[in-house]
Amino acid sequence: MAYNLLKGKKGIVFGALNDKSIAWKVAERAHEEGAELVLTNAPVAMRMGEINKLAEQTNSQVIGADATNLDDLSNLLSQSMEIFGGKMDFILHSIGMSPNVRKKRSYDDLDYKYYSQSIDISAISFHKLLQTAKKMDAINEYGSVVALTYIAAQRTFYGYNDMAEAKSVLESIARSFGYIYGREKKVRINTVSQSPNITTAGGGIRGFDGLYDFSDRMAPLGNASSEECADYCVTLFSDLTRKITMQNLFNDGGFSSMGMSARVMGFYNRCLDNLLPDEW
Amino acid sequence: MAYNLLKGKKGIVFGALNDKSIAWKVAERAHEEGAELVLTNAPVAMRMGEINKLAEQTNSQVIGADATNLDDLSNLLSQSMEIFGGKMDFILHSIGMSPNVRKKRSYDDLDYKYYSQSIDISAISFHKLLQTAKKMDAINEYGSVVALTYIAAQRTFYGYNDMAEAKSVLESIARSFGYIYGREKKVRINTVSQSPNITTAGGGIRGFDGLYDFSDRMAPLGNASSEECADYCVTLFSDLTRKITMQNLFNDGGFSSMGMSARVMGFYNRCLDNLLPDEW
Amino acid sequence: MAYNLLKGKKGIVFGALNDKSIAWKVAERAHEEGAELVLTNAPVAMRMGEINKLAEQTNSQVIGADATNLDDLSNLLSQSMEIFGGKMDFILHSIGMSPNVRKKRSYDDLDYKYYSQSIDISAISFHKLLQTAKKMDAINEYGSVVALTYIAAQRTFYGYNDMAEAKSVLESIARSFGYIYGREKKVRINTVSQSPNITTAGGGIRGFDGLYDFSDRMAPLGNASSEECADYCVTLFSDLTRKITMQNLFNDGGFSSMGMSARVMGFYNRCLDNLLPDEW
Amino acid sequence: MAYNLLKGKKGIVFGALNDKSIAWKVAERAHEEGAELVLTNAPVAMRMGEINKLAEQTNSQVIGADATNLDDLSNLLSQSMEIFGGKMDFILHSIGMSPNVRKKRSYDDLDYKYYSQSIDISAISFHKLLQTAKKMDAINEYGSVVALTYIAAQRTFYGYNDMAEAKSVLESIARSFGYIYGREKKVRINTVSQSPNITTAGGGIRGFDGLYDFSDRMAPLGNASSEECADYCVTLFSDLTRKITMQNLFNDGGFSSMGMSARVMGFYNRCLDNLLPDEW
C-alpha cells in the first residue's frame, strides 16, 4: 500500500546490490511512495549486482561511485542534481565492508591496514558524503539522511569484529554532522539499527544463522525484515519526522530492549536439561 | 497535508485538554489521516477543557474516564469497541500530574502520599490501561500504543521533581508490557520523549521559560512543536513502523544528543564576560 | 586482604539477611576495611535471619527498622548517630521485594496494591532514607550512598516482573537525589547493578537457574559474586571515588556490554543441531 | 593518604607530559599505592615534557614509544617485562590528538588524512597496544587496562570535532577487546570518562573555558580534578574491582546524568534578563 509520502521528493540510494539488500527494498518503497531516485554503488559491486534491473523497475538513473572517493562523490551529487533539476531531499547510506572479516582475521589478530579500510569504507564514507553534500549545498532544507547500522556499536557480538568500531564511528558521525547540518540547513541525520538480515552482507559473519535465530526468539515481534526496514526509512524521509535528528533508531522487533525472553529461556533450559553432562 | 496513513484505523486519545495540548494535535492529525477516534480525559479535566470542540471537529465521541480507575478504563474500552464495531488500532497516553509539583514541595521535602499519586496517575495508569486492554483483547494485531514522556527520565532537570520517577516508570512499563503484548498479540508499545512545550501542563514547572529557551538553543533544529509531535505519532500508529517496539524515541530537534552547541556556548560566554564580578 | 580503606568511617548497612546476602558481605568487608557499622533490617526479616551473628562478628549494633516507615528511619538514623558519636559516611541500601512475584501474579495480571508495595518497599524506601538523612543532616560531606539494582531497569527480563519498574525508580532516585544532596552537602549517590546471585532473594524469580547460567556464559569474566560486589562497594564508600555520583555502575563481569558471546552461541548452536525438529 | 592498594603490582603509564597531565597524577598515585612503574610517551612529546622528573620522583624507568607503531609497542612491552621481571598488572592509556583540531579545520571541512590520524593516534593505538600485549601474554590474569575518554563520544560538543569519533572508537575497542581479553585471560578493560580539565591537551579546543565553567556549574559536585581521576584509576587497577569490565565509567561530579541544574539555570536566566534585546 502506498501513501504518496515522498511525492515530489528526490533522493539517492547507496548500496542496492541485489533484491536481498535493504537498500534495494528502500529504493522500491521510496519509488512507490512517489520519490524520484538516483541509485549508486561502487563500480565493483555494480558489476556483481543487478542494479540495472532495479533502475528500470523504479525508473531511476544509476551512477557509479566509490563512496570513499571525494571526486566520485562530488560527481555523483552534481550529476544527481542535474537529473533532479535541483537539490535532493533524502539519502540512504547502506555501505559496510570489513576486509578483516572477509580474510577471517580474528579481532585479536587484526591487520591494521584492513582495520583502517573497514572504518574508511563503512563509516568515513558517510562523513565524506555529508561534507561534500554540504559544500555543494546539495540537500534541501529539512532533508533527511539515514545510514544503516547494527547494535554491535553498543554491545559486543562475537564475530562482528572490527565492524563494531566502524558502526560506532558511523553513529558518531550522524550525531556530529547532524548537529552542524541541522543548525545550518535544517538537514536531519539519523541511523537505523536494524535486526540481522539474511543478506549477502550478513552471510560473511561467523555463526550468523544461530545469531539470526537467537535475535528472532529474543525479540517479541521477531526480527525486522528488509521490507519493514524500507517502510521505516520512508517515514524518516517524509515530512512527518522533521524534528528527529542525531538519533540511533532501533528497527528490531524489540530486541535492543530485551534481556531475556521466555522463548530463549525455554529453549536454553531445555538444552541445559538435555545435553549430556560430559559436554560441559 | 494528509496521506491517509491511518485510513480505516481506530484509536483512543487520552489527555486532550485544550488546543495547546499535544494530545489535541494528535487527535487532529490522526483524524486528518483518516482515523476514527474516541477522546477521553479525566472528568475533572473535561470540565475545565474544551474537549467537545475537538470532538465535533474530528467527528469523535467523548467518554470520560479516570485513568487510575480500572472500572473506568474497562468501561472506556468496551464502549469504544462498541462505537468502533470492533477492536482498536492505536492509543495515545498523554497523562501526567504531580501533586508535589503543584503544591511546590521540593524534591528533598516530598509528601509521600503525593509521590505515590504522581506515579499512579502519570505511569501506573499506563499499565492499568494496557492490562485492561489485553484482558479484553481490545487491540488489533500490530496495533500501536504510544505514551508521551520527557528526557528527565534519563537526566536530572532542576524542578522536574518526582515526575522524573514517574516518567522512568512509564518508560519501563513500555518495555515490560511491550515484551508481553508483543509476543502474544504483536502489539507494539513505545514512548515519545518530546521537547518541552509551552502547555498548561509544562507551565507548572519552575524555571520553565529558561529551560524552553535553553533547549531551543541547544537543539540544532530547535524544540519540536506539538504539531510536529502529532506528525511523528501518526507515523508510529501507521503500518510503516511495525517492528518498532519497546523504544523510547526522542522527538526533540536533536537535544538529547547534544552536549554543547555553539549557540548556547556563545550566549553563555557573553554572559560570563558581561555579568558583574560580584554576581559570582 | 585489607587496606584500611574505610578507617575511621561509619556507616549503616541495610538488608543483611544471612551469609548469602550481598549486604552481609558488604558489612564483613567494610568492617575488615576499618569501618564502624550499624546493621539494620525489617523486624520481620530480622526474625528469620541471623543478623546477630553478623553483628557479633563485625562488632556492630543492630537496629530494626521498616524502611518504608519514616519514624523508623528517623529513629534508626538518630540512634546510629548516637552510637557513632556524630554523622555517618556511608549507607548501603539493599532492599527489594515484590508481592506480585511472591504471589506469582504475571505481569499482565498484576495486583495494583502489590505493585504499589513493590515500588514502595524496593524504591521509595530509598527516597525516604535520603530525605530523612538530609533533614537530619546525618551524612558527612563527601559521604557515599549505594543502592543495589539490576539490569532489568534497562532491559526486559522474563519473570523479573514489576521489579523492573521498582529498579527504574530506584535508579532515578539515585540521580534526582544525587543532584540535590550533591550540590548541597557533597554527598554522592550511586547504584550498583549486580550480576544475578544465588541468594534467598534471587531464588523467587522464575527460571532463575537458567538465567544465572546464561549470564555467566555471556559475561567474559563470568557473574560477579557477592564477595566481589562487596569489594566494589568498599571502593565506592572510600575517599578514592569522590566525584563519582548519579551513576549506575555495572558489576557484572561485562554482561551489560555483551550482545553475544562465543560460549553462549556455541551452546545455542549445539542445541539447534541436537534438539528434535518436532520440539520447534 | 595511601593504602597499599597496588602493592606488588606493576604497570605502564602512557601520556604523562607534564604535571598538569592526568597521566602524571596517575603515575604519582600508583607509585604512592605501592606500584612499580614504567613511563612512556611519544619521543616528540618526551622532548617537550618533563617526564624524567616524574620518573625520578616515582623511581620509574622511561621508555619512549610511538603508540601507533607496532614495533615500538612490542619493544616497550618486552623491555618493561624485563624491568618488572615478569608480566604487568595494569596499563593506563592517555593519548589523544587531532591534527584537524590543531589546524583549526572545522568539522564540515575536515582533512581526511588528518581524520584518519586522529583515529589512529587516539584510538587504534589502544587496539595495537592490546593486541601486542595479548600476543606477548604481557598482562597477568585479572590485570586491568584503563583508557581516558570524554562524554563527547555520547553527545555532541561544539568544537570537539573529530575527536568525537576517535573517542567512540576508543570506547568500542574497550568493549570488543574487553570481551576477548576477558574470556581468555581475565584481563578487564574499561574507559574513564573524565570531566574537562585545564591541561595542555584540553587547551586546544575552541571555547574551552566556557565549557569548563558550564560543566562545573552543571555537575553537583563540580568537575573532577586530575588528582581525583588518579584516585579513581587506582581503584580500577586494584583487586577490588575484578568484575568491572567493558564499561565506560564517568568521573565527572555527576555531569553526565544532569539535564539542567539550578546553578546553570539561574545564571542563564539572569543572562536572559540582562542582555540587551538587540543582542538576540
Image: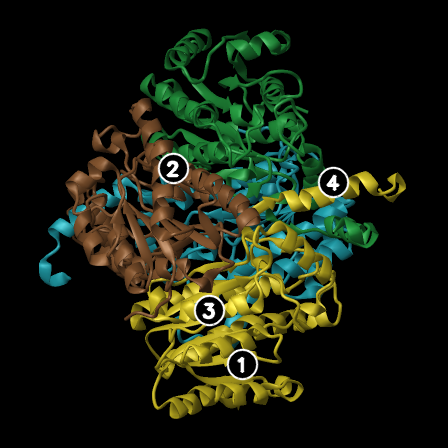
Chain colours: A brown, B yellow, C cyan, D green
Residue D202 appears anywhere in the view? yes
Q: Are marks 2 and 1 in contact (CB under 8 Å)?
A: no
Give SS at disc 1. Answer: loop
Name the chain letter of the residue that bears numbered label 3: B
Type of residue at label 3? Answer: Cys
Discs 2 and 4 carry the same chain letter: no
Name the chain letter of the residue that bears numbered label 2: A
Q: Position of residue B263 (x, y in %)?
A: 66, 46
Q: Which residue is mark 4?
A: B269
Q: Nearer the viewer, mark 2 or mark 1?
A: 2
Q: Which residue is mark 3?
A: B233
Type of residue at label 4? Answer: Asn
Q: Are marks 3 and 2 in contact (CB under 8 Å)?
A: no
Type of residue at label 2? Answer: Ser
Image quadrant holding the N terminus of chain D, namely top right
Q: Which residue is mark 1?
A: B67
* In the rendered image, the vertical position of residue B12 relative to residue C182, given as above or below: below
Q: CA distance from mark 3 to mark 2?
A: 37 Å
Q: Nearer the viewer, mark 2 or mark 4?
A: 2
Q: Which residue is mark 2?
A: A74
* In the rendered image, the vertical position of residue D233 relative to residue D44, given as above or below: below
Name the chain letter of the residue that bears numbered label 1: B
